[in-house]
Structure formats: structure tokens, C-alpha cells
């Protein structure tokens, strides 16, 4: 069964450093998402991406965040200058269409720890 | 997205049916009702969705009230592997966003 994969599973970084979280969505999917979940809190939407551009972003997704689909398979989330409060699980998801009726498939997540 | 209300937690015995309720009294006529679950230390996972009619799939059944102001996710025979947080989410197909807006969900504990 096709699945979304994410690397690394755990990333530890120093405050102020740049990090890139990587995702490989399901191959024939067209819509891509990043969510995050701070420990013990709700899963929060960050950004959606379609046709090589951002479709929607939340208030969390400020100028420190960017997303890119550099080739036909990878989908990345970059945080330019990490803060302590960026520590969270980051989940990538993809869907075959806008997902209004269809499901989003989530990856296993990357745990980001900012020291 | 319209707001949903779920109990914080529920318990079930293994092999017993589980009914997870969700209230969505402000649902609009075009909102779909989606259920996702999040097993411990994993990403969310789609369970089922519906609009008006009851729905069944290999994982669960979804019973939707006639006025659509509430719904119930039914796990016919809970197993230990079903222990997870279950999220009821409304999605508006007329909006520009296709994001999922997660609440706090219901934490289901399954015991032997």
C-alpha cells in the first residue's frame, strides 16, 4: 500500500539554525500539506500546496517558514531560524485531489527538538 | 470550519462495540463529516466520511443523524489496536481551503 514517508524521524537543532524537513508524498497525489503538533496539543494546519504554489497558509506559517517541491517526488518544509517554540512533531500529508471528499494520507512525522 | 464537540475520553472492553459521538449543531448543508484517528506516536489516519447517509467501510461505520447535527462513529468490535484519539472534523467543499482542522478529539482506551 502506498504511503507518505518523512525524514528524518527526529531532528535536534540549536535555536537560530535552519532546518529542512523532508517528505515524499504518495506518487500520484497532487495536493500536499504540512501540519504540526506540539507535545500534548492539537494537530495544527500549517500550509497547503498545489501546482507548485501555496494554496493556503495559517498564521503559524510566517516568514520563517517556506515550502518547496524541488523535484517530482520530494516536498520540503524549511524553517530559516528555529525558535524554542518550533519544537513539535511535523506531519506531512498528501491527497489525490483537494480532499474535500477524499482522505489525506499522513506520514509518520518528524520530531523537531530545538535547544 | 464549523465546530464539533466530542467527549474527552471513552473506555471500551476489547471485542465490544464502541460508539463515539460527535455534536455539530452548526453544520452547514454542504459540510462533509470526516473522522480521523491518531494512534500513539503516529500521524493521523483517515477512518471514514459521509454527508447525509450512513456509511460503512472496513474500519468502521458512520451513523449520521437525520438533522445532521450529530454523528456517531461505530467500531463494531474494538481491539487493543483501536486505542487512539478519534477526531470528528467538518469540511466545507465550497471553501478554498481543503485543510483539516483538528479539535481535541476523543481518547479511546480499550482494555482486555
Image (cartoon, coloured by chain):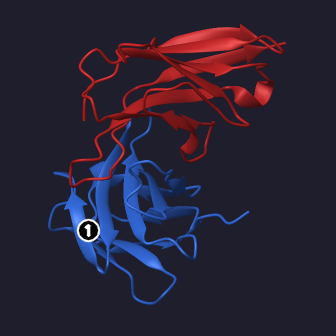
**Quadrant where the image shows the C terminus of chain A:** bottom left
Horizontal and vertical percent position of residue B87: 47, 30
The residue depicted at 66 percent of the width and 17 percent of the height is: B109
Question: What residue is shown with label 1?
Answer: A16
Count residues near mark 1 (Cα–Cα under 10 Å), then give few for <14, some for 14-19, many for 20+: some
Chain represented in red: B
Horizontal and vertical percent position of residue B29: 27, 29
Query: Can residue B35 be seen from the camera position used here?
Result: no
**Quadrant where the image shows the N terminus of chain A:** bottom right
- Is B17 on the left or on the right of A78, as rendered? right
- Is B17 on the left or on the right of B70, as rendered? right
- Is B80 on the left or on the right of A83, as rendered? right
Which hue is chain A drawn in?
A: blue
The residue depicted at 38 percent of the width and 53 percent of the height is: A35
Horizontal and vertical percent position of residue B15: 84, 15
Q: Chain of mark 1?
A: A
Image: B75 above or below A78: above
Query: Can residue A61 be seen from the camera position used here?
Result: yes
Horizontal and vertical percent position of residue A80: 25, 73
Amino acid at each position: 500500500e502506498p504511503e507518505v514517508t518523512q525524514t528524518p524521524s527526529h531532528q535536534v537543532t540549536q535555536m537560530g539554525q535552519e532546518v529542512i524537513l523532508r517528505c515524499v508524498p504518495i506518487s500520484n497525489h497532487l495536493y500536499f500539506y504540512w501540519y504540526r503538533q506540539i507535545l500534548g496539543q492539537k494537530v495544527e494546519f500549517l500550509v497547503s500546496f498545489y501546482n507548485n504554489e501555496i494554496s493556503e497558509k495559517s498564521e503559524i506559517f510566517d516568514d520563517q517558514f517556506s515550502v518547496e517541491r524541488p523535484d517530482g517526488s520530494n516536498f520540503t518544509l524549511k524553517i530559516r531560524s528555529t525558535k524554542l517554540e518550533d519544537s513539535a512533531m511535523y506531519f506531512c500529508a498528501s491527497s489525490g485531489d483537494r480532499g474535500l471528499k477524499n482522505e489525506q494520507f499522513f506520514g509518520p512525522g518528524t520530531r523537531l527538538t530545538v535547544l | 470550519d464549523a465546530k464539533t464537540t466530542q467527549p474527552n475520553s471513552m473506555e471500551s472492553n476489547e471485542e465490544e462495540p464502541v460508539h463515539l459521538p460527535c455534536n455539530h449543531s452548526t453544520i452547514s448543508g454542504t459540510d462533509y463529516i470526516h473522522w480521523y484517528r491518531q494512534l500513539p506516536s503516529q500521524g493521523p489516519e483517515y477512518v471514514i466520511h459521509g454527508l447525509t447517509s450512513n456509511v460503512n467501510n472496513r474500519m468502521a461505520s458512520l451513523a449520521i443523524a437525520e438533522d445532521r447535527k450529530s454523528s456517531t462513529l461505530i467500531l463494531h468490535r474494538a481491539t487493543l489496536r483501536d486505542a487512539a484519539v478519534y477526531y470528528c472534523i467538518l469540511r466545507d467543499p465550497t471553501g478554498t481551503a481543503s485543510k483539516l482542522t483538528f479539535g481535541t478529539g476523543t481518547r479511546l482506551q480499550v482494555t482486555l
